[in-house]
Amino acid sequence: MKINAPVHKNETLSGTVIDLTYQGMGVVKVDNFPIFITNTLPGEEIEFKITKVARSFAYGRMMTLITKSPDRVPERDRQYTQTGIAPLQHLAYSAQLKFKQHQIAELLQKAHLDIDVSETMGMETPYHYRNKAQIPVRMVNGKLETGFYKRGSHDLVPIEDFYIQDPKIDEAILVVRDLLRHYHIEPYNEETNRGTVKNVMVRRGYYSHEMMIVFVTRAKKIPMHDQIVEAIVEKLPEVKSIVQNINPEKTNVLMGKENKTLWGSDTIEDQLLGLTFTISPLSFYQVNPQQTERLYQAAIDQAGLTGNETVIDAYCGIGTISLAVAQHAKQVYGVEVVADAITDAKLNAMKNHIENVEFVTDKAEKQMKKWQADGLKPDVIIVDPPRKGLAPEFIEAASEMKPDKVVYVSCNPATLVRDIQLFQERGYQVAQPIQPVDQFPQTTHVESITVLNRQ
């Protein structure tokens, strides 16, 4: 296939960076042909080398920075960009917040939607925030290592300080790594599908400081596991739960279905907005607790609840939003497709003595149709869908229930904009500015809250 592009591999050119992509790469154009270059910022003049040419775009590598953006800050570590852990580490934090606001505003503009976007709600300390880590364990140059994959590859880069994780989690990973080395545990080899330990997952409660360590293994047994467990308990006093998750499949799915508790409790606990939540190895629990509290509080405030409303929480997970909302509403109904999450949600409701909630396991769009057929009339519907956004059937059923408000918590601006248009076709309008919230500082991800009112 002949590619007719104005640039060629290994060619060296110079140009001005005009934009940042949603992945945080700088964009330079040659005859209107985009070239994507990491570690560059809008306004910078650079000399760059073409590394790969595709039909409608190319990739390049910066060789010389000729003029520097005023928003550039020194990189903490080149590895954070290489692995995609912190692709925006070279951009000043105030500019990261503007970039996230602009990301949403630009997509709205492209869709010809005249909707304002507020300034992004940022963090005071925009690093060391993650309360969960899933770290691959591999052999690198004959030595067992923990770290992160180079972007777009399965080559492990050994890392000891992950920058965006709770430092106590980084410390725990090193303790585990050194024990696996000490007892000569064989790390997983993707090519041969051999070896014992694939990944180590660590979770730590932000308020509770309870820690869970999960060994994701290919094999059913971990050699010397009694000695390893004993040493972990001795070295890491915060650990309350050590679990083995068995995942024998050769797959990109990180966790298997089978959990074996090796020591301590099956779960840990943490608090969110004053409520206590039980977290199991497979639970979905937001990874930035400080910003999650601000996100959920803002969603509750924008829902304008008085205590008399019936609320549906779609994609409710382990009930974090449902239970926070229940204190401000008459009745809350939560739906989630993951059965284990609903088990946790019911447990969390009991634990917090909250009785005005009802949880159901099903696909959100299917359950909405059932509720609609049963004549359920919600005043407010809250949605917090995955990156792919809402199914059209969901929007149809939701609109036919005629709630006064839909509060949309989004983790993907592209699907948010698409879904706003579908709601508009059904008589809903965005009445106030969209509120971006920075859940993932140093990365390009942005969460936001949109309120749609029925006209």
Image (tube, rainbow, N blue to C red):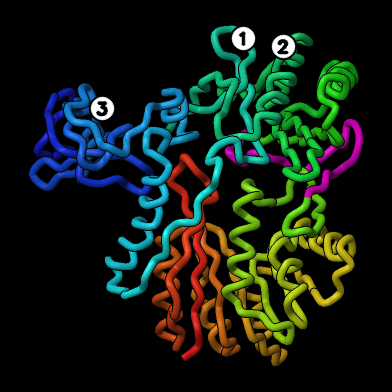
The magenta-colored residue range is 250-270
Q: Is residue 350 left or right of residue 166?
A: right
Location of mark 1 (residue): 143
Residue type of the residue flagged with mark 3: Arg
Residue type of the residue flagged with mark 1: Lys
Q: Eyeballing the image, is 329 above or below 122? A: below
Tell me which label, 3 or 1, sits earlier in the chain. 3
Eye-nearest disc, 3 or 1: 3
Residue 91, given in percent of the width and then of the height, sits at 37, 38
Disc 3 crowd, CA 10 A, few/some/many (<14, 14-19, 20+): many
Disc sitting over residue 105 in the figure: none
Counting the numbered discs, the total is: 3
Q: Is residue 55 visible?
A: no
Q: Is residue 309 visible?
A: yes
Secondary element at image label 1: strand
Disc sitting over residue 181 in the figure: 2
Foreground: 2 or 365? Answer: 365
